[in-house]
Amino acid sequence: MRITVKYFAALREQLGTAQEELDTDAATLQALREQLRARGGVWAEALAEGRPLRMALDQTMADGAAALHDGAEVAFFPPVTGG
């Protein structure tokens, strides 16, 4: 399936990209995260298992169990604090 993956804030800076179109066979957000982490280098560091990371599927916050579908829009971003 083909999906759009967007990266925000410090994650975008660390990975050096804001967005990509990706062909994947990952069934869930967690599986996609693991697939991206397998790229190694900064990808493995930025998407590491213990690192706090928020995820959205089709502009709705979701957890790792959320099922992907063809044409999905996925977003990864670090937790944001403000004041």
Image (cartoon, rainbow, N blue to C red):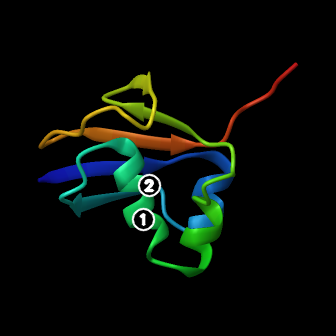
| Residue that carries the numbered disc 2 in the rendered image | 33
The residue at 12%/43% (across/down) is: 70
Q: How far is the residue under mark 1 from the one under mark 2? A: 5 Å
The residue at 11%/53% (across/down) is: 1
- For the C terminus, give its image quadrant: top right
Q: In x, y percent, where is residue 43? A: 54, 70
- Contact between marks 1 and 2 (CB within 8 A): the answer is yes
Q: How many neighbours does mark 2 have within 10 angstroms: few (below 14), some (14-19), or many (20 or more)? A: some
Q: In x, y percent, where is residue 44? A: 57, 70
Find the residue positioned furthest to the bottom: 41
Amino acid at circle 1:
Leu
Closest to the observer: 28 or 78?
28
Could you tell whether 40 is left or right of 6 in the image? right
The residue at 57%/67% (across/down) is: 15
Amino acid at circle 2:
Arg
Could you tell whether 5 is left or right of 3 in the image? right
Residue 60 numbered tag: none
- Name above or below for residue 45 compared with residue 61: below
Could you tell whether 44 is left or right of 51 in the image? left
> What is the quadrant of residue 20 in the picture?
bottom left
Which secondary structure, mark 1? helix
Q: In x, y percent, where is residue 30? A: 41, 47
The residue at 21%/60% (across/down) is: 24
Q: How many neighbours does mark 1 have within 10 angstroms: few (below 14), some (14-19), or many (20 or more)? A: some
| Residue that carries the numbered disc 1 in the rendered image | 36
